[in-house]
Amino acid sequence: MKVVITGGCGFIGQRLAQRLLEKGSLVGPSGRQEEIDKLTLFDTVAPPDKLPKDPRAELVTGDIANWPLFESLIDRDDISVFHLASVVSGGGEKDFDAAMRINLNGGLNVFQGLRQRESVPRLVFASSIAVFGGAAMPETVGDLAKQTPQTTYGMTKAVCELMINDYSRKGFFDGRSARLPTVVIRPGKPNAAASSFASGVFREPLNGEPCVLPVETSQVMPLLGYRSVVEGFIRLHEVEAEALGDDRAVSLPSLVVDVAEMIAALRRVAGERPLGEITVAPDPFIQAICATWPRDSREERADALGLPKEGSVDEIVEAYIEDYL
Amino acid sequence: MKVVITGGCGFIGQRLAQRLLEKGSLVGPSGRQEEIDKLTLFDTVAPPDKLPKDPRAELVTGDIANWPLFESLIDRDDISVFHLASVVSGGGEKDFDAAMRINLNGGLNVFQGLRQRESVPRLVFASSIAVFGGAAMPETVGDLAKQTPQTTYGMTKAVCELMINDYSRKGFFDGRSARLPTVVIRPGKPNAAASSFASGVFREPLNGEPCVLPVETSQVMPLLGYRSVVEGFIRLHEVEAEALGDDRAVSLPSLVVDVAEMIAALRRVAGERPLGEITVAPDPFIQAICATWPRDSREERADALGLPKEGSVDEIVEAYIEDYL
């Protein structure tokens, strides 16, 4: 079978690609494990070094809102898509039209592309806990919380969840949405996500560089390590549709911690390793977005489906050191 | 100011037009009452007899998904839109693509048209309690219930609610969504809405004609009379944005009754008037849609805003006899 990862050159896209190539098979539209003979990483920018060294892998550069191009990727009935391509939260607040084009029109291209096949392909969509927010948001956010997002990013994610439920109900494809909490620790450079500091507060000090926090250390956020995110995407792809029922969206498990606890875990795991200095310099733009995030989270559906999470923030820091330092 | 009613030749559109012409003014983008000098009824089919006999009124025929045409209607800064145009529930189940084109692309045309103005116009959108449904739906549906619609119609309404919240948050326009329960008693012919029988069960017998019910008399549904719907739309248009907060969608008040109670009210009000016979012949297609509807409803936000409802089903039947017989 063929697997397409949109946003395949991003951090999670790359790790997911590696993991799928190792694993070698997925449940195909046939309902049986099928060997992956082609893995397409689709992204707006796809430098050659993002191509996994594997004959099954290919890179395709393009705009997900370009229908003829995207349609040409969904060229087989034995196919699955992991739809990760997205404008991020801070980016969407600064450019509403880009968020609508990439997240909404891009999403519709994915949905229509899969719908055109003779088979009922599986789709895993990277949604976000940014679908929650506002005055209606309960103290503890669970899978039954009403979705009243307070960012354009969160709105487009909620809209795609609704569409995936309906396309799946109609039998056009077999979709599953995974709501991501903040994913840590992203290597490399900060990005335009409002939550970028949640990786930076670990990454920069571990690199011996200073970290300027745009929020107070009392800021609470639900976190998940990238290893669990990738494993969660794959397990959600593999579960039987019956286990999901008529709501195909599941919040991935999370660790709910404040920034002070994140820093404490960093210091514990780092031990004698010299760390760059962390200073606090609140940024009103970032703080305003963070203020809309859930302060507590329960993930009963993910727990029932056996989706994984790390045992502690320390474990997330240890994995990052092992993988990247 | 100018007022545009999409779906303006429909039953509610026509009654709303009449009411606005009588009223003569609305709160404009200025925040003050402004005189209505033009009322445009926009619809796919607009027979000349749908034009109110009033020099302020005009009919425009067209497809709401046609952007240049729709844009040309939003040609003033002192404007308000009542967006009622929609593919209905049964129609949307039979033609998914029509529901997406009219309800989603049509909605986006309304939103983008208003966004282009220099002012912040008000928008009232006819949403539906069909946004609720499925396994996640609580026994009693309130304004905080999660939206897991089980029809394409309901999905597109939920998506438009989310978009209206976000466009309003961004200050692109000042939107308000009114979730309609089943509106009764519609005069004329049955339509493609799954709830069409809820009017037919009153209308056909009162016309001396037989009524064949596609559901059991134990079928429960939240109802609202058309007079309250029209009044609710206007009051929702007039409230201060601050009263709505960050969630611009409000379930209109309703009377939750079963079909047996509807028939009992009909017989009470009809008195000596001869009635056509009512027979039950369940239709699996209609029953399957009805089975997804809420069986109880609370409308705390509408109550707090003072949106009206009839005191009883009897009152709804009396109004219909007064208006149409």
Image (cartoon, coloured by chain):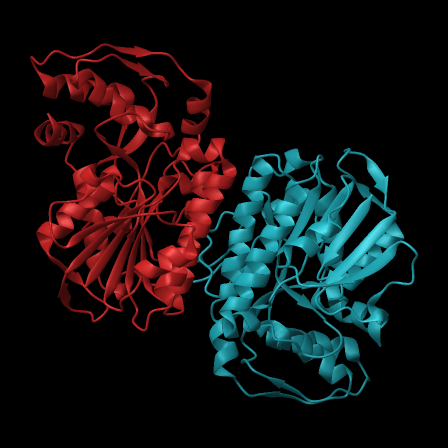
Chain colours: A cyan, B red
Left or right? Give the position of A288 relative to B44. Answer: right
Residue farthest to the front, as pictured? B48
Left or right? Give the position of B110 relative to A10. Answer: left
Q: Quadrant of residue B190?
A: top left
In which quadrant will I find the N terminus of chain B? bottom left
| Residue B298: percent from left, percent from top | 30, 42
* Residue at figure coordinates x 71%, y 78% from the top left: A202
Is residue B137 visible in the rendered image? The answer is no
In which quadrant will I find the C terminus of chain B? top left
Image height of A316 relative to B311, above or below: below
| Residue B12: percent from left, percent from top | 23, 41
Number of marks present in the image shown: 0
Nearer to the camera, B66 or A241: B66
Nearer to the camera, A322 or B313: B313
Nearer to the camera, B319 or A260: B319
Q: Quadrant of residue B51?
A: top left
Q: Quadrant of residue A134?
A: bottom left
* Residue at figure coordinates x 61%, y 57% from the top left: A106
Left or right? Give the position of A93 relative to A234. Answer: left
* Residue at figure coordinates x 16%, y 18% from the top left: B206
Is residue B120 visible in the rendered image? The answer is yes
| Residue B108: percent from left, percent from top | 43, 56
Image height of B62 relative to A322, above or below: above
* Residue at figure coordinates x 31%, y 40% from the top left: B45
| Residue B259: percent from left, percent from top | 28, 21
